[in-house]
Image: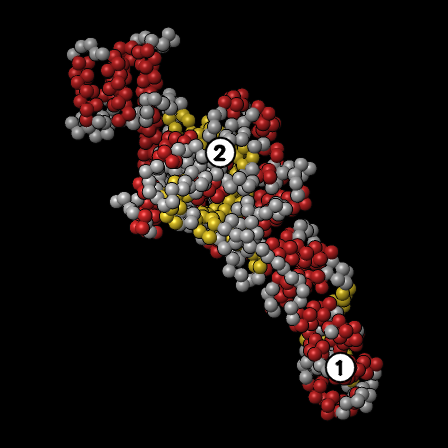
Amino acid sequence: MSSEHSLHQPSDDTETRIAVRNKLSDRIEQRRRKETLNTEAYVRELIRDVESAIVGDAEADHRTEGLLEELHLYLWHDPNRPTGTGGGSVDSVVLYRFNQIHRRFKNGQDIDAPTWFETLVAVAKGLGYVEAFSDLTQYAPVRLETLNEQGRQSNVETATPIGRRRIGADDAADLEDRAVEITHSSCDHILAVALPRSGKDSTITSIGMNLWSEHNYSYFSILDDGRMETPMLSIPNDEDAIQDNLERMGQEPEAFDAEIMVPAMDGIPSKLPANFRPFTIGIDDLTPHLILRLAGITKSDANTEQRIKQALDKTLERTSEVTELVSRLQVYAKEMDATIEWVEKGDDSVESKSVQYHMEAEDALNKAAQRLAHLAGEGLVASPRAETNIDMESVIANQEQASVLCCNFLTQGQEALKYTIMDLWLRLIYQARDGDMRLPRVCLEIRELKNIAPSKLADVRYKETIKTLRQTIFFLSTQGGSRRILMLGSTQKLNDVYKPVRSNMATKILLRLGEEEIETLDRSYNFSHEQMNQLSEFDIGQGMVLAAGEAYWPLEFRGAPCGLGLGDRHWLDRYGVAWGARVRESEYDGWRSKHAESEYWVNLVENTVVTDGSVPEIGTWHLVPEDFENGLEPGDVDQEAIDSALERRREYPVESDLSLQPTGFGDRQRELSLQQQDRDTTVSETIEQYNIPESIAPWLSKEAPTREQLVGTCRVVGEHDDLTSQQDIADHIDWSRSTLATHLRKSNSLEKCIMQNGKYYELTPVGKRATEIAWDVVMEELK
């Protein structure tokens, strides 16, 4: 073979002798493993046939004794069968019975079929042929891809399963070969589709928990429809059905260590669990683009963004107050002339140049100013000094805690604002990840994605706000993966989600669906007849994964180990129970009869001991004397005793502090005044409004005669093109040559206005502008 073609051919990485031995060894091991799998599958089939024969199944082979003999011999000749009395993997009592039966079998004696069968099944379980007689089905794990490359490492070697794949009892497949891995190396977005209460939110939250705990993602839950569902991440799951599901998976309920972020606005209750954190957004985290998004403006030009940038920069240089930023935006929204100045250096000269252009009035800036004023008045936007300001980079970097955005306390009339806040959060997350790729990956869990990325806007409230938010979701669906932001979404119907968004969610999880939705999906995925039957027969929690052009089914997904929303129980009651408190959830709970002999109870809301014989009100977190060790007297109940009692009463560990704490925001009212508080701000706005160059802005504070003389000097130089000396200029004004010389040397006087170009004096662009300004009008406005 020519050297040209040999470059494209395979080659051994080792010596030929070693390569041959390694390949033969692999082939022999594969064949041995295949034979073992075939044997195990056949043994499971024999067990099923023996069961049918014993119970008299009309369709089964009735050669019970022959089937038992065959099953017995397979187990007896298993190379892993323990031969000693220790039993090894098989219980010693079972092994003893098995040996006794074998002796009777060799001697040709009769053996009671049910007893024989029971022993053989126990041996088969001990040797690993079956996991449970009640279900001979085999299950392969469903898990997330393990990452082990530079910059993207999982912190486990084998990921905890998030589900299992059903394999027939008589299937000889290797379970690892049938394992399903959901890929996320490129942060492919995931969308779960299912009927209501069929496990879609539970499934995406379950996946998100593994991404957070095992694959080094920061976890964000963005959307709550008002029922306080997403804050349930902070408690272990308390639903019986999901607890049974977790037990089948060999796992237990588990809570996120979660921080619930609530906008620091009117409506926040006076007390909340300690993991609730009011937040504001500092204007130093805003960009021109974000300010326009806040105003609902999705299309703008460079000129508009430049005006906002200048207003923002000037505000941050001076007071950093929202009021100043609002005022500057209003000033920049007016018609004005702009001057751009620059210096060009030649070999032996320095030449100042400028260009002027007219900027029309900007409605966008007025709208942005009004929106900022509104948000500042509501308490969402604050100065950079506010202690409640959120630092999104720090939030992403904090992988110990999940972050939940909760806008459910907004007062009536503010409902549309939660979509603006969501939009701002998503943009800040993207901005942080885009600016620092060393930050952890981000997992965004969005339940009922159709609420913020609907396919049709005609049926939604707050169309303009949601349209803006939908554009952000679309942006993340296309650009988020490259910034390592993975979206986990759920919806009841695929077509309810904006098509450009759902098309970019590469992995689909299909759970229990209605006939109409199955037919809709079939038009896109062309399901086989078997797949169609499976989709129509799924129970809650069962489903199919569509990824990379492949379909994997039937799968049983793990329920979310953390809490989910329940329509029948108040969210705060469930928080209390998870924390270890007693909570009265009904008037008919028999509290008086149960605790009639109690001389006191502890009110955990007010942190007081109640001895007046009253009964806790509905929803009150409390403890009774029997919860304390050593029968404490009322006067001996202290915080240490309360904490110990709560900890003992917890069924599962809770990672976050859920004790009720004052928020400091209850019934607080805010007012925002946009009136100027000082003259400096007024001067600054006037300078901006009349386009006064910074080098001559000090003229505003000079005495009127001085200012008029400075302007007059500029006009003299502009009107005469034959002035060659300072004396020539002084001849036309009321200053002496020495006084003029002093002003020509001062940077805040005439230095930037007049220059000598070769032989003659002439005006710079700043000097020309000084002659154009209506100084009388300017000074009148400053009064």
Amino acid carrying label 2: it is: Asp
Q: Helix or strand or loop: what does disc 2 sit on?
A: loop
Amino acid carrying label 1: it is: Ala
The percent coordinates of residue 253 (x first, y second) are: 39, 38
The percent coordinates of residue 254 (x first, y second) are: 39, 40
Frontmost residue, 576 versus 455: 576
Q: Helix or strand or loop: what does disc 1 sit on?
A: helix
Residue 291's image quarter? bottom right
Q: Which residue is mark 1?
A: 704
Q: Which residue is mark 2?
A: 568
Answer few, some or many: residues within 10 Å of disc 1's Cα (few below 14, many 20 plus, some between 14 and 19). Answer: some
Q: Is residue 468 visible?
A: yes
Residue 94 sits above or below residue 780 on the image: above
Q: Is residue 353 visible?
A: no
Q: Residue at x 29, y 13 (%)?
A: 67
Mark-to-mark CA distance, 2 and 1: 76 Å
Residue 161's image quarter? top left
